[in-house]
Image: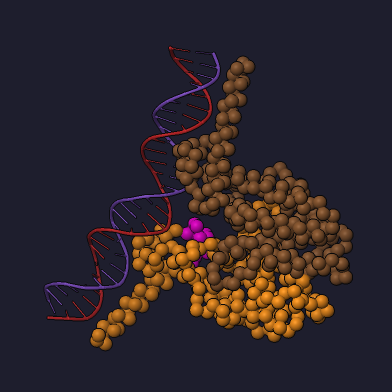
Chain colours: A brown, B orange, C purple, D red
Amino acid sequence: MSAKSLASFERREAERADTRAKILEAAREMFVQQGYEATTMRGIADAIAYTPTALYHHFANKQALVAELCRMDFDGLARHFTAGSLIADPLERIRQIGLLYLQFAVQYPNHYKFMFMTALPDNVDYHTENAGNPERDAYALLVLSCRQAIDQGLVRPEFRDPDELAQILWAALHGLISLRITKHDPWVPWRDLEHSARHAIDILTTGIMRSGTAGTR
Amino acid sequence: MSAKSLASFERREAERADTRAKILEAAREMFVQQGYEATTMRGIADAIAYTPTALYHHFANKQALVAELCRMDFDGLARHFTAGSLIADPLERIRQIGLLYLQFAVQYPNHYKFMFMTALPDNVDYHTENAGNPERDAYALLVLSCRQAIDQGLVRPEFRDPDELAQILWAALHGLISLRITKHDPWVPWRDLEHSARHAIDILTTGIMRSGTAGTR
DNA sequence: GACAGGATCTTAACGTCGTTATATCAGTTA
DNA sequence: TAACTGATATAACGACGTTAAGATCCTGTC
């Protein structure tokens, strides 16, 4: 392969990456504004002046496209958390993680909906190589904080399992967020989300703490 | 209108109600087994040997059909709770409501998914006249229990709002349930649902209680 | 008993979706 | 220049929710 051919090969590859990025960008915008179901392959193609078929040369199908967006969003969430990973006190850090999580959900509700409220088929694998790394995986960060809280004797002895603890804490906030996203009826007189979330975090950390521990906040 | 015509009129009405019930029954079964999206009007029609068009003479569209099922399921949930409404102590009753809620979700996961994890368009109204009645509306029962707990001085003074309290409690369990329904990946090492739910209820009630109150369970 | 009216159901179709088999067309390579 | 390769387009398939137009059958009236 000549030097020239190498250069053109690289150029072609760059072009390919470019249209791929354009597809993702258009898909992200449509998805964020209209949600998963309302976003169609035809619509994405229209937005960037391609035919629907062209998308299938860059992504196997709609799910693969959407899995790629998902991957990027999980990375974004992890980055959203790095600021909070510095606080030393585990319980205080858990509180901060909760508030950052809420902030992410409020800021990007459709991303949130897609990341945590959409069941993807089993064959779709959107996990990065960062799984388990607390600096790149938000769940791992939460588990780590729980483990430290347990190890430092801050937690009631009934709750020795950091994963279970992390799941309970996560679920409490996810429940508040997802119920509001899903059920916007007048049936339930919803209270202010951030206010409720702060109270929930307060209740949970208090309920977890070994009685006599300082920091009722 | 003669006596005979009245009788036949009633018979026709009964027949109509009968096919309507058949549609609902088939729809429920398909929905419970395959979920909302996978259940098609054509499929329901096939199951009861009608054409898809026939369904539209009984329900305006798929959403209306599904709203009717929803209405019935909310009634079922409320009935699921009447057994638990008898316990006198409010906090203990809240614990029992939580466990019954979990039991319902485990027993009818697709009903649950449909009732609490599916966003219906705003124009769909599936609320019965029972809204607000603690004996027929599960949310109202939970709010009532929270209000009684507050009134009896069992709750920390920060949490005076029974609706907010009810929403936090509900959300904590809903989060556990819905995350497991949605995210069945290997990314998170999920713990046993019932075990986690019992711990969550324990954490929440402890976190809510005015310190010094008896019944740490 | 014949006949109009209305309710119930069917036939056939429309427009949408995700997806794919086939064709086209450009740039690269030989 | 001719073959090759990869990106894009055309046209179509089958499935979906839904609907317009007709068929069928029972009812009540004359």
Residue A54 is situated, as x and y percent measured from the top left of the image, at 49, 36
Q: Is residue B17 above or below residue D8?
A: below
Observer-nearest of B160 and A175: B160
**Segment colored magenta:** B28-39
Identify which residue is drawn at 34% across, 77% down.
B13
Q: Is residue B34 magenta?
A: yes
Residue A146 is situated, as x and y percent measured from the top left of the image, at 80, 58
Observer-nearest of B121 and A189: A189
Write down the quadrant of residue B23 in the picture.
bottom left
Q: Is residue A104 above or below residue A6?
A: below
Q: Is residue A67 above or below residue D20?
A: above
Observer-nearest of A5 and B96: A5
Q: Is residue B6 visible?
A: yes
Q: Is residue B17 left or right of residue A156?
A: left
Identify which residue is drawn at 68% across, 71% down.
B169
Quarter of the picture holding the N terminus of chain A: top right
Q: How many marks?
A: 0
Write down the quadrant of residue A184 in the picture.
bottom right
Residue A127 is situated, as x and y percent measured from the top left of the image, at 67, 46
